[in-house]
Amino acid sequence: MSYDVYLSAPNVGDLEKEYVLDALDSGWVAPLGPHVNDFEHELASMVGVDHAVALSSGTAGLHLSLLVAGVKTGDEVVVPTLTFAATAFAVKYIGAEPVFIDSEAQSLNLDPELLADFLSRRAAEDRLPAAVIVVDVFGQTANYTAIEKVCAEFGVPIIEDAAEALGATFGDCMAGSFGKAAAFSFNGNKIITTSGGGMVVSNDGEFIDRVRYFATQTRQPVPWYEHEDVGYNYRLSNILAALGRAQLKRLPEFIAKRKSVRDQYVSYFAEHGGAVIQEDAPWGVSNSWLSVAIFDNASDAEKMRLDLGAQRIEARPLWKPMHMQPVFENNEVIGGEFARDIFERGLCLPSLQFCTS
Ligand SMILES: Cc1ncc(COP(=O)(O)O)c(C=O)c1O
């Protein structure tokens, strides 16, 4: 279905044209080039980490982060149930199994108390998960103080899925600066886009070198094609990196615009009732990627979605929790009622245009 107002449409202008034309004119079309290197440096410096590798998608970033973190076939990996399926799919690509954990109400992210209970039970059985993926859902960081403490206690590495949260903060730190590594997405609906793309960032240079190695078909540094491991074709092209650099320069503008739209929803529902807009958790500032409304009941949320749709305005339910997905019906879930409830009563509202009619 096409709409007049989309949930999260890309915003591309003259700066993007200038950068992409530069990439084309420079002759660096096939496929890597200086824009890729500059995009990696600029994004790493904005996030406040030392290293980055640009990839073809955020999903590729999660896949290789798990691989390089040492997750193996048959392992288990903790995944918040309230996320986009790519988080859990990346676990399956490794041949590992996601164990889903419910969210807390302040940020809608992984509940540290449920995580602590789960890890202590598993430690007693001597079968800890190989990693915990923490998602910064809808552009809001998770409670890293609590989650890092729990994971450190049990020695389980964190991979941050910051796909939706570029530019968000946790205290003085940026989204993407937690855990062993973090993955961003530049998919078409994200806060900045390369039409499709992603990035893994980390303070560990060897980790990023290994991600780059696997993403570049595991080529060995010899004149012929020599491979000691199975590789992947996961790098971002120079042309798309040029687009990403221009978008990154405009990130503050995008965040400000989306925040002002979210503030208008907050005022609207404060006056009219019927729903509350998810506001920032006390520990950080979200990038306002999507405005999340939680309605008093499920039928009001569905009525609003249909009314907006009739006016050609896109609104969408929250991520359907992973433990409710047929593909994961046999996976373990810890809790799940909170995520189910807000899925049923929640709606993502367009972040770029506010409409009162
Ligand atoms: C939470 C989350 N993780 C991972 C991804 C995957 O990113 P990509 O679409 O770039 O593969 C997305 C978005 O699409 C996402 O929202």
Image: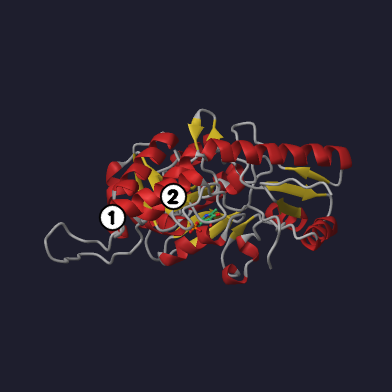
Residue 140: image quadrant is top right
Question: Which residue lies under the disc numbered 2?
Answer: 243
- Between the C-alphas of marks 1 and 2, the distance is 15 Å
Q: Is residue 161 visible?
A: yes
- SS of the residue under disc 2: helix
Can you name the residue that lies furthest to the top here?
172
Q: Is 162 rendered above or below residue 87?
A: above
Is tag 1's residue or tag 2's residue first in the polypeptide sequence?
Answer: 1
Q: Residue at x 44, y 57 (%)?
A: 57
Q: Is 291 rendered above or below residue 30?
A: above
Three-letter amino acid code at the position of disc 1: Gly
Residue 17 versus residue 322: which sits nearer the camera?
A: 17
Left/right placement of residue 215 relative to residue 4 reads: left
Colour setup of the view: secondary structure
Question: Which residue lies under the disc numbered 1?
Answer: 27
Tag in front: 1 or 2: 1
Q: Pinpoint residue 142: horizontal percent, then vertical percent.
A: 57, 41
Residue 24 versus residue 140: which sits nearer the camera?
A: 24
Three-letter amino acid code at the position of disc 2: Leu
- SS of the residue under disc 1: loop
Left/right placement of residue 228 relative to residue 45 reads: left
Total residue callouts: 2
Residue 229 versus residue 311: which sits nearer the camera?
A: 311
Q: Residue at x 35, y 40 (%)?
A: 41
